[in-house]
Amino acid sequence: MTNGLYYIGDNPEKSLEFKYQGSALSAILERFLSEELKQIRRFLTSIKSLDLLSPQLMRKRARKSDDDLGFGGEKLSAFLHNLSENESIELINHIQKPFSPTFKSFETRAKFRGWKKLFVNEQFPEGELIRTEAKHVSDGLLRLLAILSQMMTSHTVLLFDEIEDGINSERVETLVDLLVTAPKQVIITTHSPMILNYIEDERAKESVILAYRNKRGATRLKGLGKS
């Protein structure tokens, strides 16, 4: 795209007709988009990006979720509150068996004016059940609740940044395995080469893309399976 013109493939250049909304693709009016660009925009708008997940925000109370965690996970308690019984059981099983045997359940309580507060129940070998408010729950468990709960949403594409942050290193492989087999398209960004060790070679060659800078400082992308 140069001088206010854009083109796709061998097609002739077209001028940009747009109203400003924050990015070039979102700014171009629908009627001026080619079918290829329409498909790209539909794909991008279907992505749920969770690259700003913050345990500090996830510990807060929330009122409404609208089937969404919010940009940083600040609506986690309200989102979990709205899950069906079967969805809650499925989420508990996803966390309890592979990640934390002491994790028994989570619960939410509606407070004054609809604010939802999140609690986690854990049971240790001594047999005592301990209920912990979200503000005292570990970063890793909160991130697992947020990440795995997204399997119950209508989003078809999920984007996670630095998936290993806050997760016990012994559990990262299990998390990657779950996301690789998820019934949604999952995009993971990471600076850790360790993640590559957890992906089967053939799948890695097909799906992993390396981002790097060339000698001129320009960003380039290269598929892992390409020479």
Image (spheres, rainbow, N blue to C red):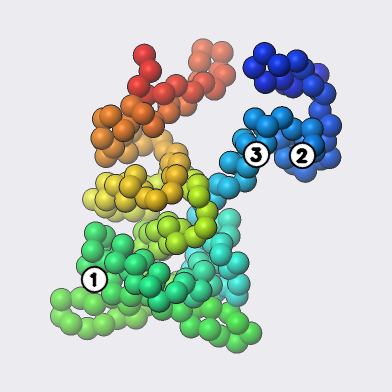
Badge 1: few (under 14), some or many (20 or more) residues near its Cα, within 10 Å? some
Earlier-in-chain disc, 1 versus 2: 2
User: 102 or 39, which is in the foreground?
Assistant: 39
Is residue 181 in view?
A: yes
Position of the N terminus by quadrant = top right
Q: Give the residue at mark 2.
A: 30
Q: Indicate the amino acid at tag 2.
A: Glu
Quadrant housing residue 122: bottom left
Q: Give the residue at mark 1.
A: 102
Disc 2 is placed on an element classified as: helix
Earlier-in-chain disc, 1 versus 3: 3
The residue sitting at 26% across, 35% down in the picture is 200
- 16 left or right of 189 in image: right
The residue sitting at 45% across, 62% down in the picture is 152
Query: In this picture, is 227 found above or below 91?
Result: above
Label 1, label 3: how far apart the Cα atoms are: 43 Å
Disc 3 is placed on an element classified as: helix
